[in-house]
Image (cartoon, rainbow, N blue to C red):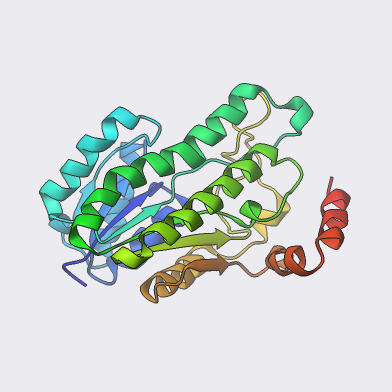
């Protein structure tokens, strides 16, 4: 595992941070990216406390919407560690607002961060994996990528797009030695609701009961790491009723639509 390089975006908090600390215990080489360098340094310290040497962790501040910065970022990682074995596209932002109250700039931001940023970085990393004939690309999607939910029209649209893109990418590259995994979390106890965008683009600033009662984030990371190690193509992770919605959407979509309406 010590020769394995794992790059995690959105690594400054939540699922990304939990994955970083979990992988640190495996002795891998980690690249930690997000916009907040101070928080990345804090996460890096947690990783060294969990077994990594300082030279096994690269703090690489990055805004995935700054496409022009991505080629240099990839070269920095390759210059430090030589190759990238696993890219986990985990950067993202959620939403808490009714469609009628949501400014179009909020929808644009959700698409830029949650969809286009993931695609742009993947496109920069993919040629190097194809050249090696090996690699693994993962993305943190959501149950909202398969199920429509009130107050999340833009978030659901973005996560549905993410699921579609990476499912299609898998079909293109799996025969060339590249694995693609979509991580499908339900409600996980993070700050995702508090940091979500309100209709005017400001932070929502509040927790909600669904998130507060969700799966503990380190438990989520354990499930995801095991599934990624097993090269699972789709990784549902959660413990609440929202996970049953994945099944209901397939077998009884009308019932799910009625349940979603009842939550407004």
Give how far across and how far down residue 132 sits, in percent.
18, 60
In the image, residue 16 above or below residue 136: above
Determine the image quadrant of residue 20.
Answer: bottom left
In the image, residue 257 above or below residue 231: above
- 165 or 96, which lies in front? 165
- 243 or 221, which lies in front? 243
Give how far across and how far down residue 219 sits, in percent.
50, 70
Give how far across and how far down residue 205 sits, in percent.
62, 36
- 55 or 238, which lies in front? 238
Query: In the image, what residue occupies the spot 66% across and 31% down?
Result: 198
Quadrant (top left/top right/bottom left/bottom right) for the C terminus: top right
Q: Give the side of residue 50 with respect to residue 132, left or right.
A: right
Q: Give the side of residue 76 with respect to residue 112, left or right.
A: left
Query: In the image, what residue occupies the spot 33% across and 44% down?
Result: 123
Query: In the image, what residue occupies the spot 85% across and 57% down?
Result: 259
Q: Is residue 184 at least partly visible in the picture?
A: yes
Q: Give the side of residue 164 with respect to residue 4, left or right.
A: right
Determine the image quadrant of residue 171.
Answer: bottom left
Q: Give the side of residue 148 with respect to residue 22, left or right.
A: right
Query: In the image, what residue occupies the spot 44% across and 63% down?
Result: 181
Q: Is residue 202 at least partly visible in the picture?
A: no
Q: How many marks?
A: 0
Quadrant (top left/top right/bottom left/bottom right) for the N terminus: bottom left
Determine the image quadrant of residue 5.
Answer: bottom left
């Amino acid at each position: 595992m010590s020769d394995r390089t794992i790059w995690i975006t959105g690594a400054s908090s939540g699922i990304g941070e939990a994955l970083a600390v979990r992988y640190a215990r495996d002795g891998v080489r980690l690249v930690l990216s997000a916009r907040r360098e101070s928080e990345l340094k804090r996460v890096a310290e947690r990783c060294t406390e969990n077994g990594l040497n300082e030279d096994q962790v690269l703090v690489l501040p990055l805004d995935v919407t700054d496409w022009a910065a991505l080629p240099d970022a990839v070269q920095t990682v390759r210059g430090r560690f030589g190759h990238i074995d696993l890219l986990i596209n985990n950067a993202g932002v959620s939403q808490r607002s009714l469609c009628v109250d949501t400014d179009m700039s909020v929808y644009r931001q959700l698409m830029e961060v949650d969809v286009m940023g993931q695609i742009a970085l993947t496109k920069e990393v993919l040629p190097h994996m194809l050249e090696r004939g090996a690699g693994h690309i993962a993305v943190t999607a959501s149950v909202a990528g398969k199920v429509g939910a009130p107050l999340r029209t833009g978030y659901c649209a973005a996560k549905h797009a993410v699921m579609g893109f990476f499912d299609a990418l898998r079909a293109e590259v799996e025969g060339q030695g590249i694995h693609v995994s979509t991580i499908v979390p339900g409600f996980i106890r993070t700050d995702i609701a508090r940091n979500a965008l309100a209709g005017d683009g400001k932070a929502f600033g509040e927790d909600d009961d669904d998130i507060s009662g969700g799966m503990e984030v380190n438990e989520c990371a354990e499930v995801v790491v095991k599934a990624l190690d097993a090269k699972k193509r789709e990784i549902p992770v959660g413990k609440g009723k929202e996970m049953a919605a994945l099944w209901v959407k397939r077998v009884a979509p009308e019932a799910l639509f009625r349940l979603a309406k009842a939550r407004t």
